[in-house]
Each structure stands twice: as structure tokens, then as C-alpha cells.
Image: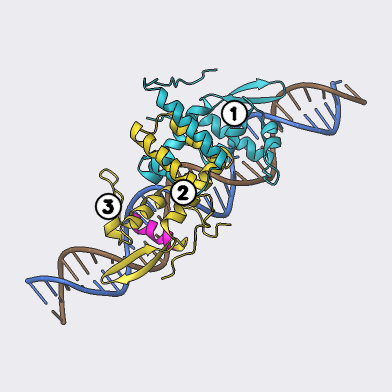
Chain colours: A cyan, B yellow, C brown, D blue
DNA sequence: CACAATATCGTACAAATGTACGATGTCAAG
DNA sequence: CTTGACATCGTACATTTGTACGATATTGTG
């Protein structure tokens, strides 16, 4: 069902940086890494190359270097990742996960309120919108 | 902060089986695997050994074979796993995850109602209970 | 008690992942 | 142009993970 290989931890880390700026070069990713996470330039480069090989990113020559841009929409990757996770940990049931989050106080009072608002919204929309999910071609 | 190495996918899969029956032998795990997932006896054995080596399970001779039992409480492992996941995907924010689940219709109407009930419950308990989290020693 | 069945133990090995080196190409400034 | 700075490309290599083999120990049953 999912054609492309899944993301490793390190790959997800750099993919998120690329997503956050709609595309990035090796150096940009390197600079966007959180303080303390000091990977080598070459290492980041390897992750970006692998992301392209796995089908998650496109490349385009941009002056001196290469610009990596999203090929699959981030939201879709996130959904797939969540889905995989829920299957591995809760047999595909989403509710137990949410239950854990609430029981474990992972939401502030404010967030609980926001969540409640979301539920109100969700109640509204019965008609199932099939959420388009093509890939972005270069 | 987390002393023990994290679980790999295959390890989590068998750990969950051990948890579900409060302990299991290699054969029991093998038989509890979902149809279609046919691992070799030796393979399951390796995963169980690794789980012990990583500190997740205890072992006890049980007649002919070895019984593997939980050493760390499943709930704690689940929490840690969720926590790690949320950090890797959402910088530690739980709400965006829940939002995704709702937006992506991962909860049935019934589950949405249950969730609402949970929120009502959560509203009740302001005093923060610090959730004990020791390990189960043999 | 001997044996067939079933365990365990030590080990193996390929693929995936994390991390990086050396050689080579390119471009902007002197 | 030449050179230095910074890129890319091909490759490497240790660790972790997925999966399993062969040798040896244990045990219920004929």
C-alpha cells in the first residue's frame, strides 16, 4: 500500500527540516539542526541523498549546490508514520493512544480545551471527504 | 534519562505478546503471532533473548524451557515509546498528533464520544498525581 | 534406559541505519 | 586564468536489526 521505504529516525529528522522550509540545501539543513546535534556536513548529505533515493525528496541544481524539495506531501508522510506507529503499538486503534496521552497528562488544560473544540468541529462534519493524496511531481 | 536501549519493531511485536499473557515461552510467542507472520522458532528465540539483554524481560526456567516475563511495566514502555515518537514527529507536542488523528478520521463517532467522556474526566482531576514508575524486579 | 522430540546456546549473516572519508568538480574573487 | 572555498560523488565502515543455522542439552515415553 505504501510504495516507498519507510523513514529512519535520522531521515525523518532531516526531512522535517526540509519540509519546514519547503526545500533546503545540505548546508541549510546542517544549520537548522538543533544546537548540540552536530552532524557532519557529509552525514547530512548522505541522509538527503537517501531521502531522494527513497522517493521522499526531489532534487534540483541551484547555483553551486543542490536544492532538495519535498516530493511527497509532508502531511501524507506524517499520516503514514502515525498509522504505522498505531498499528505497531495498538493494533491500529487510535483511541488507546489518545487515552494514554490524556491519562499521562501530555495535554495542558489549554490544550484539553482546544481538543474539546476540535471534537465539536468533528461532530459537524459527517460527510466523509476522501482527502486527496497524490504525489507532487517536479 | 531512559537507561535501556529502545525496542526495535520486531522486538516490540514480541514484547507485546509476552505482556498480553504476563509471560510466555518461545513457543507460546510463536503460536500467538498473527497468521501470515511466520517467523522461525529460532528467530523468535533471538528476539526474546535480545529483549532480556536490553532489560525488558526477565527469564525463569520453567520445566523444559524458559519463561520470559515482563521486567519493565508495559505501560511504562508504551509511554516511553509514545514519548519518543511525539518528540521525533512533533517536537514533543501531543496535541498536533491528536489533531491529526481526528482530522484523518481515525476515530469513529463512538470513539469520539468516548474521548469526550475522557475529557470530562480529565477536567475533574487537577491535582497532579506523579504516576509511579519503578521496575518490577524478579 | 534409550531415543525422538523439543529446548537452549552460541553464532552467522545480510540489510538497514548512523556516521563520515577522499577524490573530484565548480564557481566567485583576486 | 588560477586558486581557494565549498559542493558533489562514490565509497566505507561500525552498529543495529531481521532472520536463521548447527551443535548440544533435557525430557517425557516406549
Q: Mark 1 lies on which chain?
A: A
Q: Which residue is drawn at 51% across and 25% down?
A: A73
Q: Is mark 2 on a helix, strand or loop?
A: helix
Q: Which residue position holds label 2? A: A103
Looking at marks 2 and 1 on the same chain, the residue that comes earlier in the sequence is marked by 1
Q: Do the residues labelled 3 and 1 touch (CB within 8 Å)?
A: no
The residue most toward the front is B124
Q: Out of B133 and B53, give the one closest to the viewer.
A: B133
Residue range corresponding to the magenta coloring: B43-52
Choose mark 3 or mark 2, whichever is in front: 2
Q: Which residue position holds label 3? A: B32
Q: In which quarter of the image is residue B92?
A: top right
Specify whether A48 is left or right of D6. left
Q: Out of B122 and B22, give the one closest to the viewer.
A: B122
In what quadrant of the picture does the C terminus of chain B appear?
A: bottom left
Q: Are discs 3 and 1 both within one chain?
A: no
Q: Is mark 1 on a helix, strand or loop?
A: helix
Amino acid at each position: 500500500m505504501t510504495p516507498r521505504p519507510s523513514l529512519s529516525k535520522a531521515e525523518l529528522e532531516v526531512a522535517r527540516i526540509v519540509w519546514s522550509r519547503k526545500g533546503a540545501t545540505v548546508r541549510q539543513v546542517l544549520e537548522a539542526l538543533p544546537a548540540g546535534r552536530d552532524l557532519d556536513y557529509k552525514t547530512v548529505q548522505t541522509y538527503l541523498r537517501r531521502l531522494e533515493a527513497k522517493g521522499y525528496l526531489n532534487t534540483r541544481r541551484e547555483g553551486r549546490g543542490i536544492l532538495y524539495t519535498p516530493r511527497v506531501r509532508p502531511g501524507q508522510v506524517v499520516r503514514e508514520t502515525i498509522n504505522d506507529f498505531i498499528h505497531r503499538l495498538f493494533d491500529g486503534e487510535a483511541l488507546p493512544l489518545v487515552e494514554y496521552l490524556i491519562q499521562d497528562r501530555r495535554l495542558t488544560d489549554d490544550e484539553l480545551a482546544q481538543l474539546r473544540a476540535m471534537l465539536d468541529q468533528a461532530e459537524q462534519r459527517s460527510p466523509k471527504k476522501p482527502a486527496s493524496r497524490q504525489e507532487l511531481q517536479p
